Image (cartoon, rainbow, N blue to C red):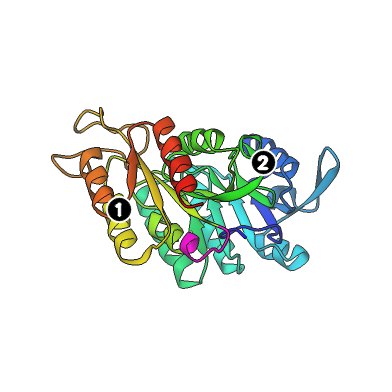
């Protein structure tokens, strides 16, 4: 199986006709994603050719849903228009909205997350690489060729690049799904959401959790693992050498005083029984060792 995204998912792309939208739509199609429509009010009624696939462009998300049955949207629109894009998708009944856009104001993210939640729409992101269920579907910008076969590992990560690295290092084992939740201060889908989904997925044997400095998401995830997760969890926390008070890469990755340090997160996870690697490569070795122990 997989979580949130399967081979049955019908994907539309908001902002498909922009440069990033075009590039990544082509990549998603190449990895087997069923992209059924693009949305751009100024180009409604046109068709975009991607190699051997012609994708129609609709003026609104609702029109695209009515015409194609789309249930997933990937958002590539610029930051000033992201809030409206997510709200439009939620109003059209889209079940999953993947917001790739970075630089969205926090108050916009808070507003569209609350709006989407009220309407039963799951948001992944913003400022995220999206999610992939290898061999089934890929919604976002995760390179499909780093892990092409489905497998036994579930991955949830704040970091896009660390998602790619862990997927590459563990490619011979494979993944049920990998979810890049994004590193902004406010995200729609959390570590805990993914932990719960992987715990309930019969094809996921082990969960990899990647965090970073800033906030308390990893501490809350550790508490959830201790209470609710029976499957083995292996973790990695980025940012042990980050200077205090300096944002590191992600808007949410900032240490203030003693709050949000990598050490505090590592200790919380280890107290919950999570084995935490000192480097991505060591984390991969811990995963392999743990899976071998379970055989």
Q: Is residue 11 left or right of residue 99?
A: right
The mark closer to the camera, 1 or 2, is 1
Identified at 14% across, 41% down, the residue is 258
Rendering coords of residue 240 (x, y %): 26, 32
Q: Which residue is mark 1?
A: 273
115 lies left or right of 148: left
Residue 226 in magenta stretch: no
Residue highlighted by disc 2 = 148
Alpha carbon of mark 1 to alpha carbon of mark 2: how far?
30 Å
Q: Is residue 98 left or right of residue 19?
A: left
Task: Please tell me which residue is depicted at 54% across the width and 63% down the height of the picture.
Answer: 201
Q: Nearer the viewer, residue 226 or 55?
A: 226
Q: Earlier in the sequence, mark 1 or mark 2?
A: 2
Q: Secondary structure at mark 2?
A: loop
Decide: is 276 above or below 8: above
Instruction: Tell me which segment is drawn in magenta.
Output: 197-203
Q: Residue at x 65, y 39 (%)?
A: 144
Image marks 1 and 2: residues in contact by CB distance under 8 Å: no
Q: Residue 51 appears in which quarter of the rendering? A: top right
Closest to the observer, 77 or 113? 113
Residue 95 in view: yes
Q: Nearer the viewer, residue 100 or 112?
A: 100
Residue lying furthest right: 52
- Local secondary structure at mark 1: loop
Q: Callout 2 environment at 10 Å: few (<14), some (14 to 19), or many (20+)?
A: many
What quarter of the picture does the N terminus occupy? Answer: bottom right
Residue drawn at x 59%, y 44% as measured from the top left: 174
Report x, y in % for residue 58. Answer: 73, 56
Residue 2 - label: none
Residue 159 horizontal/vertical position (percent): 43, 39
């Amino acid at each position: 199986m997989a979580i949130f995204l399967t081979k049955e998912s019908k994907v539309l792309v908001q902002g498909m006709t922009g440069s990033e939208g075009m590039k990544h739509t082509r990549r998603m199609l190449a990895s087997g994603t069923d992209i059924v429509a693009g949305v751009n009010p100024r180009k409604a009624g046109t068709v975009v050719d991607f190699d051997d696939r012609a994708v129609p462009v609709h003026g609104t998300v609702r029109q695209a849903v009515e015409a194609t049955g789309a249930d997933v949207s990937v958002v590539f629109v610029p930051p000033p228009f992201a809030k409206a894009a997510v709200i439009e998708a939620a109003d059209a009944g889209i079940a999953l909205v993947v917001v790739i856009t970075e630089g969205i104001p926090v108050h916009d993210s808070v507003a569209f997350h609350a709006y989407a939640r009220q309407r039963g729409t799951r948001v992944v992101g913003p400022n995220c690489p999206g999610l992939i269920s290898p061999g089934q579907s890929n919604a976002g910008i995760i390179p499909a060729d780093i892990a092409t076969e489905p497998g036994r590992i579930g991955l949830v990560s704040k970091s896009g690049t660390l998602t790619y690295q862990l997927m590459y290092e563990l490619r011979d084992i494979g993944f049920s799904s990998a979810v890049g939740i994004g590193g902004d201060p406010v995200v729609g889908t959390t570590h805990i959401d993914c932990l719960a989904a992987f715990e309930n997925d019969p094809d996921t044997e082990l969960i990899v959790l990647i965090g970073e400095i800033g906030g308390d998401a990893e501490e809350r995830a550790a508490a959830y693992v201790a209470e609710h997760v029976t499957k083995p969890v292996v973790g990695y926390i980025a940012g042990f050498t980050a200077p205090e008070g300096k944002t590191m890469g992600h808007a949410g990755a900032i240490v203030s005083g003693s709050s949000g340090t990598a050490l505090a997160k590592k200790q919380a996870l280890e107290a919950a029984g999570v084995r935490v690697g000192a480097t991505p490569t060591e984390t991969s070795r811990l995963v392999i060792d743990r899976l071998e122990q379970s055989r």
